[in-house]
Image (cartoon, coloured by chain):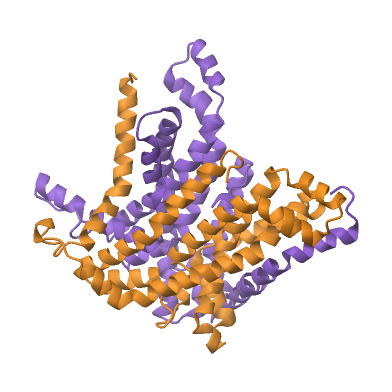
Amino acid sequence: MKHSFRFYVQLAFTLLVCAFLIVPIVLSMLAGITDNFFVGLSSGFTLRWVGQVWDTYQLTIWRSIAIALACLVVTTIAGVPLAYMLARYQGGNSRLARAIEELLMMPVAVPGLATALALIMAYGQYREFRSSALFILVGHVLFTLPFMVRPVLAVMQSSQLSVLEEAAASLGAGLGQRFFGVVIPNVFSGILAGALMVVTLSIGEFNITWMLHTPLTMTLPVGLADSYASMRLEVGSAYTLIFFLMIIPLLIAMQWVTHTTQSRVRL
Amino acid sequence: MKTASAAGRQIYLLFAAPGLTLFLAFWLLPMLRLVEVGASGPSGAAAYLAVLTNHHYFMSLLSTLLLSAAVTVATLLIASLVGLFLQRNRFPGKAILLSMLTFPLAFPGVVVGFMVIMLAGRQGLIGVVSNWLFRDAWVFAYSLGGLFLGYLYFSIPRVILTVMAAAEKLDPALEEAARSLGANPLRIFTDVVMPALSPALISSGAICFATSVGAFGTAFTLATNIDVLPMAIYNEFTSYANFSMAAALSIVLGAVTWLVLAVARSWSGSAAGAAA
């Protein structure tokens, strides 16, 4: 294929932007396994820094995974039925449904700092709750709930769901039977897309978590901030490397799911 | 369901109950409490005006807004060029290029801050290269310049995706028609492509602006003394234990972002806030 001069100029610009986004990632991954980054790669490679991060911050990693999974459970249990209501209540086009959708987006639109301060002011006096990981879970659920509701709602609206449901109803299926037997299996691609998004966002959430965490409830991103502030560049980099190794498979899965469901619905 | 009775409709509300209860108990009520705390300081409800009357807060607000506006303009320019290019051309490796361009989408602000340090920090790439070229190490990660780079870093991937989605719906026949009528590429771009893309650009620009206004992690990683509003709030809360002022400033910050998204939505006529 022959391309014009303009094509190559645009390609060069695109590659430049790509380099801006990717080069720092590669640099930090390299720094995490370099013996002494100030000296350079010639100082040799080592897993010493990764080991040090594992010793220091292992707990934050497990805690983050636990919170992300708990967050997934809560947003699925609360979010999928909520999406169903938004899709069905008064034919899915009521003012109430639109108002709820709007409200749900608020914790995403409003800075996380404000949400976190509000939670602290309202519930900070309940010491047990304040000092547990549940407090952080609440913040994550608020932030991620719309990311479960929206793809599920999109699939509900775009598929033949209402026809299928009517068919099931005419055969005598009750609401519960329809919801678990027809709706859930049919919106599975939406739930999967939402689930990947929820887990990814929860693992990376910092803005809300930083204000909500206590020294005993540090999560992975909080640990990252801590290591950037107090550790050597190599340690921060090694920790970032671990973060990338956790998040990149999720991102690839997300792109794959979006790609395969795209023919059915744009998420 | 055309035949649904009033009782049938009520049942659907039950499905919304768990989600709505969570939301009301942990977001709406705490937010109302925050509004109340904001007005409980020594200056009462006037605390909400402090962001305009107090020189320090006003300058924080101003630099936050100017920085976010600059980031938004730069992002829209870069992302439209790249997004349009990727949408319209086929070449080997395009899919990989696109996934690399959208990877940083889910990076938290702290990691983006660290990426900026890798680029423009004391041992950063830009410093090394500029030192080698001009004998002068450029280190600007720990200032507004670094923050600009960081906000650009997390904004570009979002906007590229929106531009590509909008460009996909663009009818090639329109451009064909313009070309056959003798319009040059620049003319086609300003008169045909841009108007068609503008709703997407307005809504993604608004999201980019709102995210930059509220971004905390990146500023926090780069330096605690960068003078943007989220850092001012953080310092009020932790360093001075001035809870009412922190609350008032948070409410103002939240109101600003919400307002930007609402205005953009009425302009673009599409769901701007819903794509954040």
Chain identifier matching the orange colour in the rendered picture:
A
Q: Residue at x 79, y 55 (%)?
A: A89
* B83 w.r.t. A90: above or below: above
Classify residue A57 as left or right of residue B180. Answer: left
Question: Is there any visible trace of residue A182 in the rendered image?
Answer: yes
Quadrant position of residue B58: bottom left
Quadrant position of residue A250: bottom left
Question: Is there any visible trace of residue B106 in the rendered image?
Answer: no
Viewer-side residue, B266 vs A35:
A35
Expressed as whole percent of the image width and height from the top left, the position of residue B126 reads 20, 50
* B173 w.r.t. B77: above or below: above
* A159 w.r.t. B38: above or below: above
Expressed as whole percent of the image width and height from the top left, the position of residue B144 reads 32, 57
Expressed as whole percent of the image width and height from the top left, the position of residue A143 reads 55, 64
Classify residue B184 as left or right of residue B17. Answer: left
**Colour in which chain B is drawn:** purple
Classify residue B168 as left or right of residue B222. Answer: right
- Image mark count: 0
Q: Residue at x 53, y 78 (%)?
A: A135
Classify residue B25 as left or right of residue B171. Answer: right
Expressed as whole percent of the image width and height from the top left, the position of residue A123 reads 58, 82
Viewer-side residue, B136 vs B112:
B112
